[in-house]
Amino acid sequence: MKKIVSLILAVLMLACLFTGCANNDPAPTETPVAAEEQTTIRVGAMTGPTAMGMVKLMDESDKGESANKYEFSLQTEATAFAPALTKGEIDIAAVPANLASVIYNNTNGGIKVLAVNATGVLYIVERGDSISSFADLAGKKLYATGEGATPEFALRYLLKANGLDGDNAPTIQWCADTTEALSYISKDENAVAMLPQPFVTAAQTKVEGLKVALNLNEEWQKVNDGASMATGVIVVRTEFAEKYPQQLEKFMQEYAASVKFVNENTEQAAELIGNYEIVKAPIALKALPYCNICCLTGDELKDCLGGYLSALYEMNPQSVGGKLPDDGLYYAAEK
C-alpha cells in the first residue's frame, strides 16, 4: 500500500512540474536600439583663446584617446568659418558671439549655439600712465584691431555708454592685425591701444613699458549690472545636431573637460598650446589667467549671450544680423 501511495505522489509531482513549465511564458526579448552612425566631427577654431581651450581635446584626439573622432582646423580669421558652416564643410566652430547671431539669422536657423567659450579677452593697453578709467580715453588716439567685428562693436558700445561718442570720442586707427598695431605702438611712446589676449602678453614681451590699463570685460560689467561680455561661442550646424545627438553630447562633455584642464593645469596647457603653434608656450602660460576661457551652457549661456546680443542690437542692429535671434539659437533650449 505504501508503495502505491508513493508512486501516486511521484506521478502527481511530475505532472505539476510539467504543467508549471508549460505555463512559464518565455521572457520577452528587448528590441535592440539602433546605434547612432559614427562620423568624424570637423571642428574649426581661431588661433587665440577659443583654440587654447580645446588643446586638451585636440591632444586626446591625436592620441586616439577621445570618444569621438575629430578633425581640427585652425584659422587666423573667424570670417572663414561662416561659409564653411553654411556649406557643410565643418560641423562645429568657435566664432565671435555676434557672428553666431548673424549666421543664425542669415541661414534661418542653420546653426545653434552650444556654449559661450570666452567672456572678456579685450584690453586697453598703454605705454604711458594716463589711462585709469574709460573717461580718460577722451580725445586720445587709439590703435585697435577687429574693425567690423566683435572688438569694434564692444568698443563703440562702451564709448557710447561712457559718453564718449561725440566730439570727445577718441580717434580710432584700425589696424589690419596685431602685427600692424604693434608696429605703431613700438614707435609711439604715448601709444594707447585695444588688443585681445594672448596678443597683449605677446606685445608686452616686445614693447618695454607696455601695460594693461583697462579690462574691457570689467568696464562692460560696470554698465551692464555685472553681466559679462560673451566674446566667443561654440556653434554647431543644426543638421549635424539633429543627425548625431549622441556624438554631439560626447563632444560637449569632452570640450568641457578640456576647458577645465586648461584652466586648472596652466603649465601643461601652455605646453600643448605651444605644440599646436597657437602661441608660444611662455606667452600662453602668462596669458591664460587673463583669457577668461569658459564653457557656459544652459541658463548661463542664455543669460550671458542673450544680454550681450541685446546690448549690441541696441547700438547697431546690423552687428547681430538685423534682428535679435529667437530661442532657437540656443541648443540647450531644446533639451
Image (cartoon, rainbow, N blue to C red):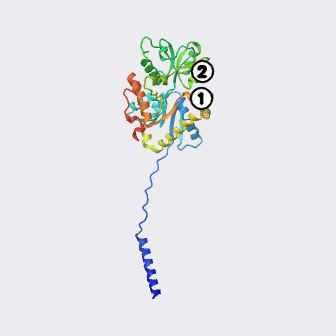
Callout 1 amino acid: Ala
Residue 293, placed above or below residue 128: below
Q: Amino acid at mark 2?
A: Gln
Quadrant showing the C terminus: top left
The residue positioned 43% from the left and 30% from the top of the image is 305
Q: Which residue is mark 2?
A: 204
The numbered disc on residue 179 is none
Q: CA distance from mark 2 to mark 1?
A: 13 Å
Q: Quadrant of the N terminus?
A: bottom left
> In the rendered image, which quarter is residue 312 located in?
top left
Instruction: Give the residue pinned by disc 1.
Output: 284
* Place of residue 60 in the rendered image (x, y in percent of width and height, measured from the top left): 58, 40
Judge whether residue 46 can be spotted in this image: no
Q: Nearer the viewer, residue 102 or 253?
A: 253
In the rendered view, does 109 fall on the left or right side of 122?
left
Where is residue 64? Give x, y as percent.
58, 43
Between 131 and 148, the one lying in front of the other is 131
Q: Earlier in the sequence, mark 2 or mark 1?
A: 2
Q: Position of residue 209 (x, y in %)?
A: 60, 17
Mark 2 secondary-structure assignment: helix
Residue 138 in view (yes/no): yes
Asked which secondary structure carries label 1, the reply is helix
Whole-percent x and y of residue 74?
Answer: 54, 32
How many residues crowd mark 1 within 10 Å: few (<14), some (14–19), many (20+)? many
